[in-house]
Amino acid sequence: MTGRIRAIFVLLIFSALAMSAGNIRLSVDVGRGQKNIGVGDLFYINIDVSNIGEEPSTPSSAPGAKVMYFDRVSQSSSFSSINGQVTQTSSSRYVLTLKATEEGKFTFGPISIGGDKSNTVSYTIGKGSSNSSSSGYDDDSSSDNSSGSSQTNSSGQPKFIGKGDSNLFLRASVTQTNVYEQQALVYTVKLYSTYDAIKFIGATDSPKFDGFVVEESKDVSHSLSVETFNGKTYGTAVIARYVIFPQMTGQLKVTGNTYTVSVDQREYYHDPFWGNMSYATPLQLNVTPNDLVVNVKPLPSPKPADFSGGVGRFSISSELKSSVFKTNTAASIVYTVSGSGNLKYIQLPDLNAVFPSELEVYTPTTDVQANVNGGNVSGKVTFDYSFMPLEEGVFKIPPVKLVYFNPETGQYETAVAKGYDVTVGKGQASSKSQANRPRHLDSKLMAVNPKDLKSEAVPMVTRFPFWLFFIIPFMVLVISVALNKRYIKTHADMASFNSRRADKLAKRRLKKAAACMRKNDSEGFYHELLVALWGYMGDKLKMPGSELMRENIKSVLEEKNVETPVIDGFISLLDTCEFAKYSPAGGQSGMEKAYQDAVKEINDVENAFKKGGK
């Protein structure tokens, strides 16, 4: 009896298991917050398996999509006995995550598990949305960037995107692309990003400005602002700004530099309960802005003789605190040039040639205050002249003219600072005037004793010492006239005079660079070194500042039969110093070498000229 009951019980169990037949069902899930599937979007196929002990194998492919990953997300089982009837069920859900790769209508299934087959599901893939590339899943088929550079997609490795994609890129711009020589331009590098956070921005090198004099501006962004570009909203920031001055004509190229940018990228995944979830992962990108070409036109000829070198729009004013002065007492007059353009390169005329000869004028103290406002370089530069009244009287300080070129009108224009009438009174005499002042003579005359007069005395005119009083002054006069003529002849051509002593002037300037080097002031060192090199070549070749360009220097040196290695070495040193001055590192490690190279190049040019003279 007991055996019969046991057999019946086992039979009931097998009957219940037979009643719980296996079942496989497929369904499509487009994701939370998503209505349609577009190219580049993620979507999911749910595989619900009931009462089957085996697991499905990972599908190798799906029509119109790429398999991202496959995993079981839930599992459950139950056992019940009602009125002697035993029932056992089990169920599992597997999710196949896919990324749409092409448009069209597609069908997936059926699949088989343990001899049971599933149903078939259909889905439609449309056009991709504009932000589909930011889904967070990187693969070879979606790595499209503007430069065509390779990407590194290994887990935990940086991803490099060359010149950028639609999510992060740099744009370089210049205020104008058709300009004149010496016209001030503003070169700007702007960052565009759609990433959640930007943690670091750093330049790996410096932009290359061929044929420009460059000054870096600190007028950059300190926070992101919102801007719409090509119908898409970005966070933007100005990360670099330079003021550039073209030094030669023709098409000059500006090559963008590379920046390293660290951002937070959103990674998306599917959770069976919460749906689509995301988290931030760090991402490093190397981005380069576009290159630019600037067309530079020469200044119209002929240039005015008193051209100041200014290119832009300027005005000039003067300030004289008093109109009454005393001799041998220093005074000051200030001229202020205001406007927009190449303020740093403006020069006023020689005031010693303009002022009355009774007023001796000294070298001015210059103060430049220039700022980048939008696309212009504006501000003012003051010239503080000291002068010394030498004689008493009423004198007229004439108006001072500033001749500059206005690129807006394409003409040379003149601004005028007003003149003054000054009165010079008697002041404290200098030691020189005291020496020339006649001595006071006593009006009382001494009585003369007739006995002291001797008729037989020899006349003074017959004595040699008497004539020495005439010969010596005459010889001094002749020598003075000869020396004066030689001095006038030597200094008549100041350009030739400066050319002969160009190396001495350069050594004086190099002393300032050496002082900056001892203070470890790299910026001041390279500034003084460039002033010494450019100044030496301007003096040696008798070139004004407006014509002092690399091509002109090379052409004149070749005409002077200077060897090519000497020419190339000097120009290469100029390029090296300018790059070191504006590089982020500042070139501190190369100051000693740059100084020695400067001395060597100047000596090489001097030796080349001496050989040519012989």
Image (cartoon, grey):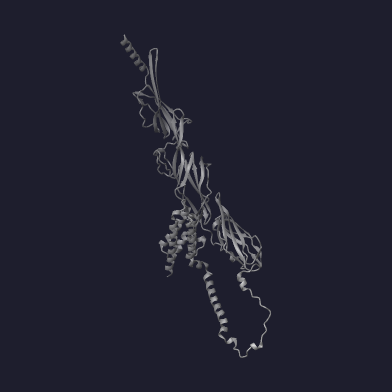
Q: 255 or 321: nearer the eye? A: 321
Image quarter of residue 475: bottom right
Q: x, y (%) of residue 4?
A: 31, 10
In the rendered view, tell whether residue 484 sits above or below residue 164: below
Q: Quadrant of the C terminus?
A: bottom left
Q: Can you see residue 533?
A: yes
Residue at far top of view:
1
Q: x, y (%) of residue 590?
A: 44, 55
Number of on-image labels = 0
**Residue 601 relative to residue 449: left or right:** left
Q: x, y (%) of residue 223?
A: 53, 43
Image quarter of residue 566: bottom left
Q: Can you see residue 188?
A: no
Q: x, y (%) of residue 393?
A: 66, 68
The residue located at (44%, 69%) in the rendering is 613
Q: 571 or 456: nearer the eye? A: 456
Q: 575 or 230: nearer the eye? A: 575
In the rendered view, tell whether residue 483 sits above or below residue 52: below
Q: 317 or 127: nearer the eye? A: 317
